Amino acid sequence: MAAFDFARLIATAADTIAAHAEELTALDQAIGDGDHGLNMKRGFEAVRAEAGAFAAKPLPDALKAVGTKLVMTVGGASGPLFGTLFMALGKELPAAPDRDGLTAALGKAIEAVAARGKSQPGQKTMLDVLQPVYEALAQGKTGTEIANVADKAADATVPMKALRGRASFLGDRSIGHMDAGARSTALLVRAVAEAVEDHQ
């Protein structure tokens, strides 16, 4: 992936989060702190500001740098979780990844996020999107198909009862609301999957 491509990918991700910041905030107001949209927007704008420097690095190092920046700038619970996702991807990804390498790296990154959040799929978190995305990637699905899987997985968090994070304090009242972290994860998956597919 050339330097220009990674910078464009960062811009696409930042644009996507910015465009949906109010939606993410509204989702988080229902069952969380209400700051998810603003926090994610701030983090990805900080990444965008250094897109050129990040894109000049080898891809694994670039992903680790993005993760570090997100930890420093997103705040709340989302900063460490999304930061861990990118840092673990960078740590596990080969310099010139193919689908198998990306699939394996994503599997390890999901394990890292689960460990950091002390959570697992089925608890109404971003993992409920990441796990189906991993499976779709392993099955050889296209970028658009993977993005559709991510959207459906985020929708599937609506009837779940939250067992982790601030939403878990609400118990049964968390049922009927989409998890904001799952939604932002799905948005990022679509942004990345479509950008990569368009460039192939």
Image (cartoon, rainbow, N blue to C red):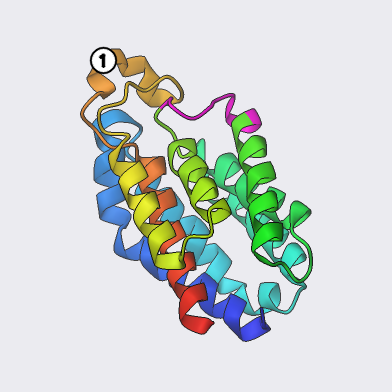
Q: Residue 182 appears in which quarter of the rendering? A: top left
In depth, the one of 152 and 76 nearer the eye is: 152
Taking the view exactly as shown, the residue that stands out farthest to the front is: 139
Instruction: Return the x and y of residue 178 as percentages of the image width and height.
Output: 28, 37
SS class of the residue under badge 1? helix
Q: Quadrant of the N terminus?
A: bottom right
Q: Quadrant of the C terminus?
A: bottom right
Q: Residue 102 appears in which quarter of the rendering? A: bottom right
Taking the view exactly as shown, the residue that stands out farthest to the left is: 176
Q: Which residue is mark 1?
A: 172
Which residue shows up at 32% across the image and 34% down it?
157
Which residue shows up at 59% across the image and 81% down it?
5
- The vertical placement of 158 against 11, above or below, is above
The residue range painted magenta reads: 115-123
What is the magenta segment's predominant secondary structure?
loop
Residue 121 part of the magenta-drawn span: yes
Instruction: Return the x and y of residue 169 as percentages of the image width and height.
Output: 36, 16
Q: Residue 114 appears in which quarter of the rendering? A: top right
| Residue type, numbered disc 1 | Asp
In depth, the one of 37 and 57 nearer the eye is: 57
